[in-house]
Image: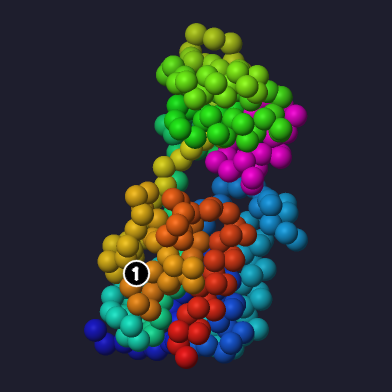
Amino acid sequence: METDRSYDVAVVGAGAAGLQAALTLGRMRRRVVLFGTDRCRNDPAEHVHNFLGHDGTPPADLRAAARKDLEQYETVEMVEREVARIAGELDDFRLEVDGFPSVQARRVILATGVTDELPDVPGVAEQFGRHVAHCPYCHGYEYRDRPIGILGPGSHVAPQSRLLERLATPVVVLMNGAEPDEAITTAAAEIGALVVTEELERVESGDRGLRVVLRGREPVDLGGLFVHPVWRQAAPFAEQLGLETGDLGGIRLDSEGATSKPGVYAAGDLAHHRDLPMPVASVLTAAAAGLVAAASCDADLL
């Protein structure tokens, strides 16, 4: 395939991980192209939390500030296009881009993130990022001092209920028609959680934040509800490049952000260290991973 442009590094994905990777490489005057759109996993969230110096910042504002930072680095090119395919080997990767000339790059950093498949309960998708969330560290404090729900069933319910005990008054476990197992029953007894077994009909805005409408029982008002989405890679590049992935589908990395294929690095929610069972998903850890991958990539190019 004939290419029209050549770079040291192609960064694919313009969320926190990709933006930080491009910044780190730009400061070392590497020729970098950053591909991505202004659509990210945390777009539904009203605010970014638990990020030093940016607690409470809208996600789009944080990305806009990062893009403005990148404008001062003359070796960084930002392209608002989606990459369709990546192929090739170390020092000769080829990227096919929708509506843009094909690109050759010596190294690639993948930062395209993941997409969430939410529980099939009416209203959850509409409330996701406001009164429905998946990370207690990112959103739990905003639901504090009110009943906080956890949507079950699943192995996440027992540990998450203990995690939320300090924030909730009380924790409410919503089993959605299932019976609680021993782990949930034990955890609920230890922390004084309420276990509700009735099926959910829908969730909607309520006086205390969120109202859960149940089948055969009075509605339950909550400050917020935590769910456990199923996530998948947002782009096909792990499969295209034959990268090693974990049981949950995350790209496996070494301590320097390198994947199983020489010359390909990854950062953010799509990837995790080989010793971890799954990615640690937050904006701050994604940005940190982008820095690590970029620094490792820069050293590799030497």
For residue 284, above or below residue 156 = below
Q: Please report the residue visible at 58 percent of the width from the left and 54 percent of the height from the top.
A: 282
* Residue designated by label 1: 260
What residue range appears in magenta?
129-148
Q: Residues within 10 Å of mark 1 (few under 14, many from 20)?
A: some
Is residue 35 visible to us here? no
Percent position (x, y) of residue 126?
A: 53, 37
Residue at the outermost left position: 1
Work out which quarter of the rendered image holds the N terminus and state it: bottom left
Residue type pointed to by label 1? Ser
Left or right relative to 72: residue 174: left
Question: Viewer-proximal residue, 51 or 40?
Answer: 51
Question: Please, what secondary structure does the residue beneath circle 1 have?
Answer: loop
Camera-nearest residue between 78 and 241? 241
**Which residue is pictured at 55% across the width and 82% down the height?**
25
Which residue is located at x 46 percent, y 54 percent?
Answer: 276
From the top left corner, tell me how far across and down residue 232 is, in percent: 38, 50
Instruction: Give left or right: position of 86 versus 301.
Output: left
Q: Position of residue 257 (x, y in %)?
A: 47, 69
